[in-house]
Amino acid sequence: MRETIKIMLKGAAMGVAEVIPGVSGGTLAFITGIYERLLTSIGSVNLGLFKIFKEKGIKAVWHKIDGLFLAKLLGGMVIGFVVGLKLVVQLLETHPVHIWSFFFGLIVASIPLIGKQVKRWSGLEMVLLVLGAVLVYGVTIAAPSQGSEHLFVVFLAGVIGVSALMLPGLSGSFVLLLMGMYTIIMPAIEEFTHHPFGPETLTIVAFGIGMVVGLLTFAKLLTFTFNKYPNPTLAVLTGFLIGSLNKVWPWQAVLETRTNSKGVEVVKFSESVLPTSFSQLTENFLYGTNPHLLAAIGIMIVAMVLVFLLDKYSPEVE
């Protein structure tokens, strides 16, 4: 029971993260020590399962894919996703500086914990660290492009979005936003929930197939790199986290807004500024101009302490 609760709580943290463009579920999986096990479990889903099923039955298949772990994690993710929609999203609308300060503290604290897993820092690892940081930083400052409703583009969005979801430092929903697909996919999903066999069905099917393809192939790739090249892989993932700090920086000057599927104005594009510059803005949609500096720093410290406690008392689930 204790192990079940621990796994579900970790899944819940991932579920909350996936609600928010800019926060990666992969990052939370890494922080909570289940990242490699999750990749191995997903990567074990392949055509070979049919042979196992034929020879040994469904119980052997369930054991092969670590089904109990996946079921507990998925259950927690569903709970976290619902909580994120109801609570975290609302707090982001009312207290954005405070909430982003918490996520910023989580990622800052997780960087050295992941970096210390690199057993040897050679020139290659240092180069990959820098390249990973530059790549993700570039993603965070890129301007959103125009999306397309063409089914092949929707399929590619599914592949790329779920691949980004699995990488610490990259948010699947944020990558969809950059591709211009967020405003196409999310309304389609919402419409699909009301009319399962309506005009949006093909869009959802194409996106879903893309997600499955991306999930299975990318998980195998990451599992291979972890097993074959652990130090370079951990180095580049550490770089990803460093680069993502720009996206979760609490003090953002909003440059452009958009109207979402519900007709509500939301942030489309913003840039990180110093607290002093933040306080000098004449107007700033959603964020306001009060930097809440002491509260923000205090929340960052709480988040950092939380990560270190998780690292100390919550080792990887066996």
Image (cartoon, helix red, strand yellow):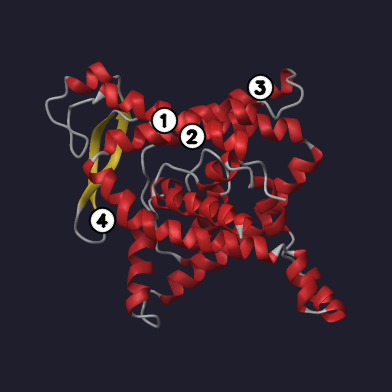
Give the position of the N terminus as an image quadrant.
bottom right
Which residue was labeled with disc 3?
Answer: 127
Q: Amino acid at mark 1?
A: Val
Residue 69 image offset from top left, x and y in percent: 65, 60
Given residues 79 and 121, the one toward you in this image is 79
Q: Residues within 10 Å of mark 1 (few under 14, many from 20)?
A: some
Which residue was labeled with disc 2?
Answer: 306
Q: Amino acid at mark 4?
A: Asn
Residue 56 image offset from top left, x and y in percent: 85, 77
Residue drawn 19% across the image and 59% down it: 263
Mark 2 touches mark 1? (CB < 8 Å): yes
**Residue 29 falls left or right of residue 65:** left
Q: Is residue 13 visible?
A: yes
Residue drawn 39% across the image and 80% down it: 196
Task: Say what secondary structure mark 4 lies in.
Answer: loop
Q: Amino acid at mark 2?
A: Leu
Q: Residue furthest front?
A: 1
Residue drawn 31% across the image and 52% down it: 87
Task: Say what secondary structure mark 3 lies in.
Answer: helix
Which residue was labeled with disc 1?
Answer: 302
To which quarter of the image does residue 43 belong? bottom right
Task: Say what secondary structure mark 2 lies in.
Answer: helix
